[in-house]
Image (cartoon, grey):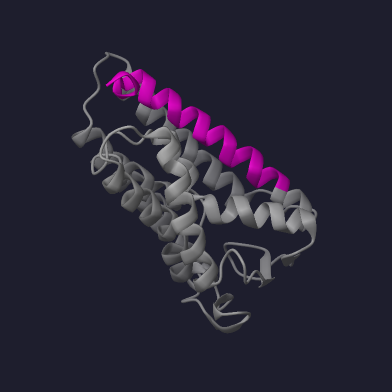
Amino acid sequence: MFIGHYGPAFAAKPIAKPVPLWVLFVAVQALDFCWSALILLGVEKARITPGFTQASPLDLYYMPYTHGLVGALILSVLFGALGLAFVREKRATAFAVIAAAVFSHWLLDLIVHVPDLPLFGDAMKVGFGLWRWMWISLPLELAFLAAGAWVYARAVPSRTRLGDLWLWLFVAAMAAVELYAEFGPPPPTPAAEAQTALLAYGALALLAALVDWGRGTARS
């Protein structure tokens, strides 16, 4: 799952309004930020296998530190604590929401991945495998994104005229990125995929900060 992860980021903002939206955007992709770094370092492993599943060419055969259940829980707590550096109010709630946003990544991956998410070490791998059927997984991703953005738009009203327009243009652009990822050429190497992921996640977090600014929430 890629764009679908941002649905929980949008939906979490109303629960903890002092948390910047960009922090939530980083949180929901924190496991993949770490995965990308470990792929580039050669610690975790993947293969590009076109047709591996309908929705993804990635054979994620070794990622116990970032996408194992134990590792995901540890990273959720760690990033929840780190996120408090950007929050001044309601810090206990903020910690819980940020940590939950991080762990939501593992839960959503569980839905779409084939069994490659280890429960312990590199063993007992799970995954419901909806990536095998793109006509199911792709609408699901877009639905998660749209639902989260709708919750955000309703619960965090814009204070500027252009706030809503910018939000929905951003959501439409994210959907377009997802469509390109699904139907475009596969990445040439796992390292190239990791580099692209880091750039994409960073860019989307920056744009999420602009969404906050455009709606006036960054000044609340």
Relative to 149, say whether 141 is above or below: below
The vertical placement of 208 against 64, above or below, is above
Where's residue 26, x and y in %? 49, 43
Q: Nearer the viewer, residue 164 or 218?
A: 218
Rendering coords of residue 121 (x, y %) = 61, 79
For the C terminus, give its image quadrant.
top left
Q: How many marks?
A: 0
- Residue 68 x/y as whole percent: 55, 72
Q: Residue 190: x percent and y percent?
A: 75, 57
**Residue 180 appears in which quarter of the rendering?**
top right
Q: Is residue 53 magenta?
A: no
Q: Which residues are magenta?
A: 195-220
Corner quadrant of residue 124? bottom right
Residue 210 inside the magenta-drawn segment: yes
Extreme-bottom residue of the structure = 124
Answer left or right for 189 relative to 36. right
Question: Which residue is pictured at 70% across the width and 51% down the height?
Answer: 194
Residue at screen point 23% across, 31% down: 156
